Amino acid sequence: MPRLRASTDALIIAAAIMGSSVVMLGESVVSLALPSIGKSLGVPFTSLQWVADGYNLTLASCILFGGALGDALGLKRVYLWSAWAFLALSVVCALAWSGLTLILFRAVLGVAGALLTPVSLAVLNAQLPKALRMRAIAYWTAATSIVLAAGPLVGGYLVDMFSWRAIFLFNLPLALIAIALGHAALKEQPVRSRLDIDWLGALLAFLFLGGLTFGLIEGPANNWPPMMIAAVVAGLACFVAFVWWERRLSSPLVDLALFKNRNFAATNSATLFLYAAFGGFGFLFSYFLQTVSGFSATAAGAAFLPVSVMLGIASGQVGEYASRFGPRWFMGTGPLFCAAGMLTLLPLGAQTTYLTGVLPGVVLFGIGLTLTVAPLTATALNSAPDEKSGIASAINNGLASAGPLIAIALLGLGGIEHAYILGVWTCAVLAVLAGALSFAFVKT
């Protein structure tokens, strides 16, 4: 079995973990603070959707650009630039004085995250020996899970003890560690002599996700005026235009030829459905656990601690088994456990207790996530050639960000009074679809 070279490979993995963790926490921790933000800034549920989705929108729509920039300018260079930007913009978010300013600042923070995310994961594929990559991604999964376990717990505590503003300052030490590791571990790469950036492709991707998100969030809240319907239609038209444009270019933002690889296409399709299920459910559960069941932000942050413990303990072993036996059964079975866990958590109410009402569903969800994440990520990256590591990582991370973006936007379609029931069922169905896709199309 290949061994890590402590002075090089281990530091590269650590840099990938910290860079990814900073951005993941930017997505997950804010859900715990939404009730506090709503009270403090006096904003309705639709504005809270935008606090989450403003970040997700720019993260998902700019992440392809981030991957292409990493391949063109060098992974280390883009990693360090974006980590510094994320640090500075986190401070700006902590200073927001209204719902609108927080939404805008979070959206800009998402741009920094869109540059940092793909290069953080791409370094595992581009700067490690091929024999170590599956194990490295398993370590990455386990370690980010531990960080994500501590993140909501600490974030909830900070909200309860201080203010929602403290969750943004929590990013600062993590970003500084990421910067130090990036300087120490990552290898310099030359800048390409010709820098071809597909600006129109990046714009069309943003307009597609932006139009869809705007229409789906604001439409139900305003009884679907023509402007909101037009935004959804325009967003879908931009998606068609994006695909047409990418097929014409010699240096596209998205190399559609990658999707000719069956595993790459199937794994990324499953990623879209699965992360839509995770993101939508996480948003709903954190919010309603506090507002309906009366859990504190700290308790809500701790609710999913068993999931992260399971991921931290077992992801490495699951990664090795998936490497030995193939990823198909893991990726097909895991989402079904996740769906079962979500449906177990459906009867959430004022009398819900953690041990009987929450923990059983959380355990099922954790088993599913542990079986799925490492094989899913490794299969998506290993299906692309080394020189396309940045854009392959960006596509996978972009779909992982676009899924929650669209899912959260859909949550208000039935009105706030029906959001939890309809949302949980929708997310469970999406998880089942991800498992079915994996069973049907991923090669063993």
Image (cartoon, rainbow, N blue to C red):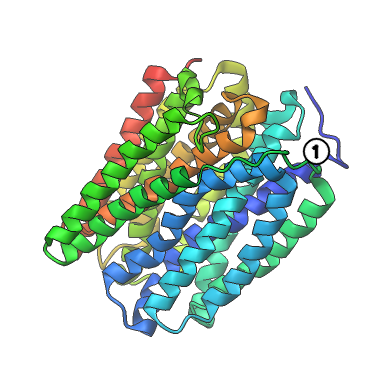
Q: Which residue, given by chain and number where applicable, does mark 1 sit on?
A: 9
Is 61 placed left or right of 47 in the picture?
Answer: right
Q: Secondary structure at mark 1?
A: helix
Is 405 placed left or right of 161 in the picture?
Answer: left
Q: Between residues 34 and 63, which one lies in front from this camera angle?
A: 63
Quadrant of res 319: top right
Q: Residue at x 69, y 30 (%)?
A: 133
Is 320 placed left or right of 405 in the picture?
Answer: right
Residue 185 seen by the camera: yes
Q: Residue at x 23, y 54 (%)?
A: 231
Residue 152 seen by the camera: no
**Residue type, mark 1 in image:** Asp
Q: Position of residue 167 (x, y in %)?
A: 54, 72
Q: Position of residue 235 (x, y in %)?
A: 29, 48
Decide: few, some or many residues near mark 1? Use Cα within 10 Å; few <14, some 14-19, many ≥20. Answer: many
- The N terminus, quarter of image: top right
Q: Between residues 353 and 131, which one lies in front from this camera angle?
A: 131
Q: Is residue 91 above or below residue 267?
A: below
Q: Is residue 49 above or below residue 10?
A: below
